[in-house]
Amino acid sequence: MQVYAARAISWRGYFGAHTWIAVKPAGADRFTVYEVLGYQTRRTGNGVRASARAADGYWYGNRPWLLGDRRGPGVDEVIDRIRAAVASYPYANVYHIWPGPNSNTFTAHVLRAVPELRVTLPANAIGKDYLGSRVIAKTPSGTGGQINLFGLAGLLAGWEEGIEINLIGLTFGVSPKHLALKLPMIGDFGAGGPVMPQALEPPMDSDAD
């Protein structure tokens, strides 16, 4: 299972990133990529797409970067939960670039259901903090908690994410674990090295959202 981000299309790429999740069950010959697309939402009323495109393929000319890579025993069971989370995404028929729900809201929703992945979404993944009518939730990595009002204002703290403040949909913060600053438009800026493949870890608790 891999999670990627890339700068968004055209002018939107100056401000934010698009994220997606790719899975490859044991014995499969290719990845399936799950993501949400704004234009598909407008055309069909359901923005969730599952495709066989390359997991690390460029996003409209923008090179992606790897956010998480988990593999090994137990992968198929977790992929089943990813598929269930994809099917349960509550905003499949709604898309707003700002403050959400959008493609990053979708990725955060799926990640909360599989905290074993321990993935941190970048600060410029606008929409990742959109919780809809909820105010309190786990962080996408499952290692902390957050409060947020419609993606416009909130606070997040987690072992993987560090501390983040969300103001009008923009994220500011610091991650001591990854030695990174979190800045609007720029994303996560720091000394963290490349993401390496890792074995699955047990969830921090059994109450995944």
Image: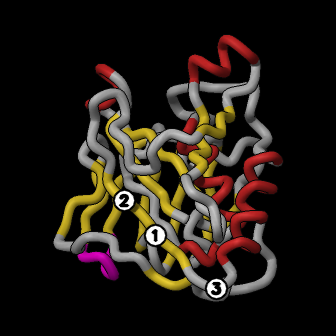
- Estimate how packed mark 3 is, as few (under 14), some (14 to 19) or many (20 or more) residues with alpha carbons within 10 Å: few
Q: What residue is at 51 percent from the left and 27 percent from the top?
A: 97
Whole-percent x, y for residue 161 in the image: 44, 70
Q: Are marks 3 and 2 in contact (CB under 8 Å)?
A: no
Q: Which mark is residue 88?
A: none
- Residue depicted at x 51% and y 29%: 98
Work out whether 167 lies above or below 140.
above
Indicate the secondary structure of the residue bearing disc 1: strand
Q: Tag 2: Cα neighbours inside 10 Å, few (<14), some, or many (≥20)?
A: some
Q: Is residue 137 above or below residue 86?
A: below
The x and y percentages for residue 152 are 54, 40
Cα–Cα span, label 1 and label 3: 14 Å
- Range shown magenta: 175-179
The residue singled out by tag 2 in the image is 66
Task: Tell me which secondary structure the magenta stretch mostly adopts.
Answer: loop
As rendered, which of 155 and 26 lies closer to the eye? Answer: 26
Please say if the residues under marks 1 and 2 sit with CB atoms less than 8 Å apart: yes
Image quadrant containing the N terminus? bottom right
- Identify the residue under disc 3: 73
Q: Which of the 4 image quarters holds residue 173?
A: bottom left
Tell me the amino acid under the disc marked 2. Leu
Q: Residue at x 61, y 70 (%)?
A: 145
Judge from the rendering whether residue 112 lies leftward or rightward of residue 208; answer left or right: left
